[in-house]
Image: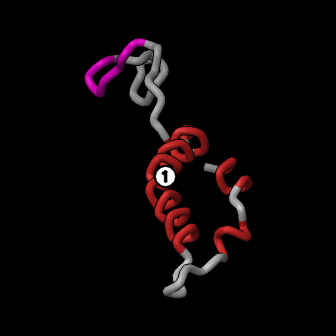
Amino acid sequence: MLTAGRLVDIEALGEKDATGRRPDLEAHLRALMKALPELSVVITQGYLAHAIPQQSLGPRTGPDEDVGDGPGADR
C-alpha cells in the first residue's frame, strides 16, 4: 500500500474525463479504501502487540492454592 502510494502518477490522477470526473483518482481511492482493513490488522499486530496479554509459563496458581510468599502465608 505504501509503495503504491509512492508510485502513483499524480498527473494521471488529476486528469478529468469528458464529464469532469477523475476516473484514475476514483479508482485509486477505491483501491486504498479496500486495503485499509488489511493495514489496520498489520498495525494492530505490529504496534499494539504489547497490549495482548501474555501467557505465563510458570505453574498456575489460584486463590485456593498456597503460593508461599503471598499475603497470609505462614512465617
Q: How is the image coloured?
A: secondary structure
Q: Residue furthest front?
A: 18
Q: Residue at x 47, y 38 (%)?
A: 52
Label 1: which secondary element? helix
Where is residue 20? Give x, y as percent. 54, 87
Q: Residue at x 72, y 53 (%)?
A: 7
The residue lying toward the viewer, choosing from 54 and 23, is 23
Quadrant in the rendering for residue 12: bottom right
Query: For the magenta stretch, what is the residue range?
Result: 59-65
Question: Quick check: 74 left or right of 3?
Answer: left
Count neighbours of disc 1 (C-alpha within 10 A) and say few if under 14, some if 14 to 19, many if 20 or more: few
Where is residue 3? Give x, y as percent. 69, 47
The residue lying toward the viewer, choosing from 11 and 73, is 11
Q: Is residue 28 above or below residue 68?
A: below
Magenta stretch contains residue 64? yes
Magenta stretch contains residue 36? no
The residue lying toward the viewer, choosing from 26 and 43, is 26
Q: To which residue does mark 1 refer?
A: 35
